Amino acid sequence: MEKVFIFGHKSPDTDSITSSLVMENLERKMGNPDAKAYRLGKLNKETEFVLNYFKIQAPELLENIEEKEKVILVDHNSFAQSVNGIEKADILKVIDHHCISNFETATPLYYMAEPVGCTATILYEIYMMNKFEIEPNIAALMTSAIISDTLLFKSPTCTKKDIEAATELAKIANIDIENYGMEMLKAGTDLSDFSAEELINLDSKELEANGLKFQVAQVNTACIEDVLKDKEAIEKAMTDFINANNLGLFMFAITDIINSNSKAIVLGERASIVEKAFNGKLEDNMIFLPGVVSRKKQIVPVIKENA
């Protein structure tokens, strides 16, 4: 069999990394021993915590894909968020929970997408449909992904399916969801070792709407003000990124996982779009967003609507 590359998006988060590993397991159960998980960037601390906790090796870094090589995309479909060379790859499958963004293939493919909080929830359904056994380490990865993407079920992206899947998977993995989940989320809020440049790229997505090219980055924290101590350096890194990538807007959302709010630093010639989108005023390049924790559901759609 030909080798199959499995990977999530650039600036990978826990769902992107763990879903790649889970999809590798699924593919091998389906009879493809040459399927292998990869990552498209550096692991964040939350994901490192998960892999270390369950003693699972991180996927190998993948920087480019060659023409006609076979790939499976998880947790994304946008070419802008995928590996270099994706336009010429042979995409076999996509498992995703995001909106479809400028996606086109030359041949038919298997595409499974649902409006749920996490890709792992869809992967769980695939195991169930095929009556495949889920090993405890695989269940642990999927549980962790659902906790991460739904902020322990607090995010508006969270659905009944996510909660049901996580509950069943936690039983298989022998995980106390509340205790483990909070420990995992808090591990991801330690941002002390990252430079400003690394912070704005930890979980950052390139987007476009009505001719507006923009970037939305997000970090989770237990204290927004701790992150803002480096505001000047963060703004410089954002400005450099804007200039290097010809962006009209860069929004860096700092999300408080304890109180379920966000504060965003917003820069760029089109920064006023954010004021319009959230019916507020930027003060010192910042805007407070009460109750906003989801980039996918609460930030990106309203920016696109007002672009």
Image (tube, rainbow, N blue to C red):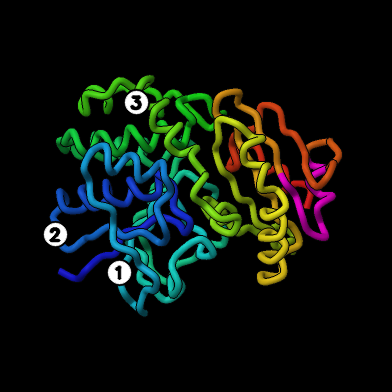
Q: Which is nearer the N-term, disc 3 or disc 1?
A: 1
Contact check, label 3 and label 1, Cβ < 8 Å = no
The picture places residue 29, in percent across and down from the top left corner, at 15, 48
Check disc 1 and report its element: helix, strand or loop: strand
Please tell me the numbered disc located at residue 70.
1
Q: In the rendered image, which quarter is residue 176 located in?
A: top left
Three-letter residue code for mark 3: Tyr
> In the image, is 183 to the left or to the right of 224?
left
The picture places residue 85, in percent across and down from the top left corner, at 44, 75
Question: Would you call the spot at circle 3 few (<14 residues within 10 Å), some (14-19), or many (20 or more)?
Answer: some
Note whether 204 is above or below 164 in the view shown: below
- Alpha-carbon distance for marks 3 and 1? 36 Å
Q: Which is nearer the N-term, disc 2 or disc 1?
A: 2
Q: Which residues are magenta?
A: 265-277
Q: Nearer the viewer, residue 143 or 113?
A: 143
Q: Which is nearer the N-term, disc 2 or disc 3?
A: 2
Mark in the foreground, 3 or 1 = 3
* Quarter of the figure that contains the N terminus: bottom left
Q: Residue 49: in sight, yes or no?
A: yes
Check disc 2 and report its element: helix, strand or loop: loop
Contact check, label 2 and label 1, Cβ < 8 Å = no
Q: Which residue is mark 3?
A: 180
Residue displayed at 80% across by 47% down:
285
Residue displayed at 65% across by 29% down:
261
Residue displayed at 25% across by 65% down:
4
Q: Which residue is mark 2?
A: 33
- Alpha-carbon distance for marks 2 and 1? 14 Å
Mark in the foreground, 2 or 3 = 3
> In the image, is 128 to the left or to the right of 117?
left
